[in-house]
Amino acid sequence: MKSSTKDQAEGKFHVVKGTVKEVAGKLSDNPKLEGEGAGEKVAGKAQQKIGQFKKILGK
């Protein structure tokens, strides 16, 4: 698997995982879990962008 595709796939996984954590934190009234989820979503989106950038560069 190309590096760019791998980054995009892993990024999407982290976005989904972060969303689940965020919703679980809201439902259980756990601000720490909600914050972890939000942070993981941001990291996942950044990783997706890195994958898109690599794809443009052809790496």
Image (spheres, helix red, strand yellow):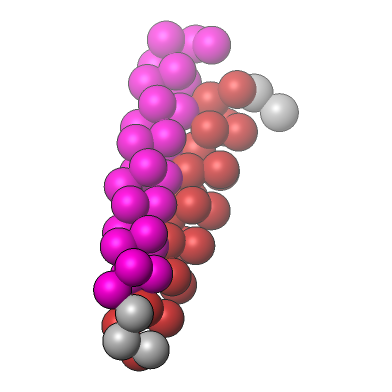
Q: Considering only vertical position in the picture, is 12 above or below 24?
A: above
42 magenta-colored? yes
Total number of numbered discs in the rendering = 0
Residue 56 point in image, percent of width and height = 39, 17
Which residue is drawn at the image coordinates 34% and 68% (left, top)?
A: 32
Residue 3 point in image, percent of width and height = 60, 22
Q: Residue furthest right?
A: 1
Q: Pick the residue in front: 50 or 43.
A: 43
Residue 34 appears in the rendering: yes
Which residue is drawn at the image coordinates 49% and 11% (left, top)?
A: 58
Residue 19 appears in the rendering: no
Q: Please give the range of residues in magenta.
A: 31-59
Residue 1 point in image, percent of width and height = 71, 28
Q: Quadrant of the C terminus?
A: top right
Q: Pick the residue in front: 40 or 47.
A: 40
Q: Considering only vertical position in the picture, is 17 above or below 26?
A: above
38 magenta-colored? yes
Which residue is drawn at the image coordinates 39% and 69% (left, top)?
A: 33
Q: Considering only vertical position in the picture, is 52 above or below 27?
A: above
Which quadrant holds residue 49? top left
Magenta region, mostly helix, strand or loop? Answer: helix
